[in-house]
Amino acid sequence: MSSFNILVVEDEDAIREMLVMVLDQANFASIAATDAEEAQKLLDDKIPDLILLDWMLPGISGVEWARRLKKESVYKDIPIILLTARGEEEDKIRGLEIGADDYMTKPFSPKELIARIRAVLRRSGKIQGQAQIILGDLTLDTEQHRLTIGNKQLEVSPTEFRLMHFFMTHADKVYTRTQLLDQVWGRNVYIEERTIDVHIRRLRKILEEHGREDLVQTVRGFGYRFSLAE
Ligand code: CA
């Protein structure tokens, strides 16, 4: 269960598979590509929360692709961690200069990788500088991926968790289905608007078990609002 999506770009099968496995064990969702071209296609489908990018790739190198991404307004805010087999200080400086958010020299431990990912997500504001978002008696823990009302834990799917994360950080404002699609599912994802209604219905049902279905309000002819006020 995760609210974060990581794009892994690595041409060496063994390393790529290891990265995907490590991310999965740490409750991150991931998608993987073997080169920059394939990664670009994945990016057009969904904007990830972070990119783990191998420096040496066949075709366009990782560092070159990172440089291009940082020049495009749609992609420039995606945090990038460069992975490299070279440990030269000069490379590190070059990597950070082109706009990478961090730089790791292989081999590294899974623990170190996850710690760096969390640190970069936190710095980029994606973890909001805090692991817990608290709103009234609701607590959403982004590291443990737990959502609780009082001391009761709610059983939500990854999508509903993302939706709750968005709602709790954007309370009291009305959002259209299109805005929710962009913010929660990402641009370029083809999902019908009524899919949102399905997820909202499920979320309300879960909240209803705790007598709190009123948190997600329908604003007729416009969209949805999340509010603690009735
Ligand atoms: Ca490589």
Image (cartoon, helix red, strand yellow):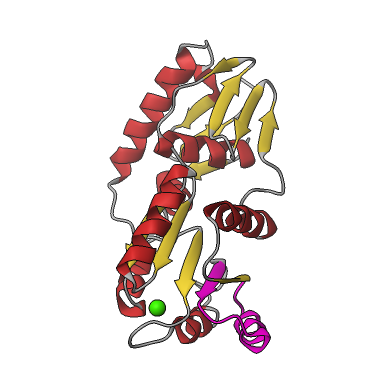
Q: Position of residue 56 (x, y in %)?
A: 43, 83
What residue is shown at x 52% (from left), y 10% (from top)? 211
Image quarter where the N terminus lies is top left
Residue 45: tell me if it is visible: no
102 within the magenta span: no
Q: Position of residue 33 (x, y in %)?
A: 32, 68
138 above or below 79? above
**Which quadrant of the figure shows ligand 1?**
bottom left
Q: Is residue 89 left or right of residue 186?
A: right
Residue nearest the viewer, comparing 107 with 180: 107
Q: Position of residue 76 (x, y in %)?
A: 55, 73
> Image height check: is 68 above or below 176?
below
Q: Say whether residue 92 is magenta.
A: yes
Residue lying at 60% horizontally and 32% vertically, measured from the top left: 140
Start and end of the magenta stretch? 80-101
Above or below, comparing residue 135 to residue 9 in the picture: above
Q: Is the C terminus in the top left, top right, bottom left or bottom right quadrant?
A: top right
- What residue is shown at x 31% (from left), y 72% (from top)? 34
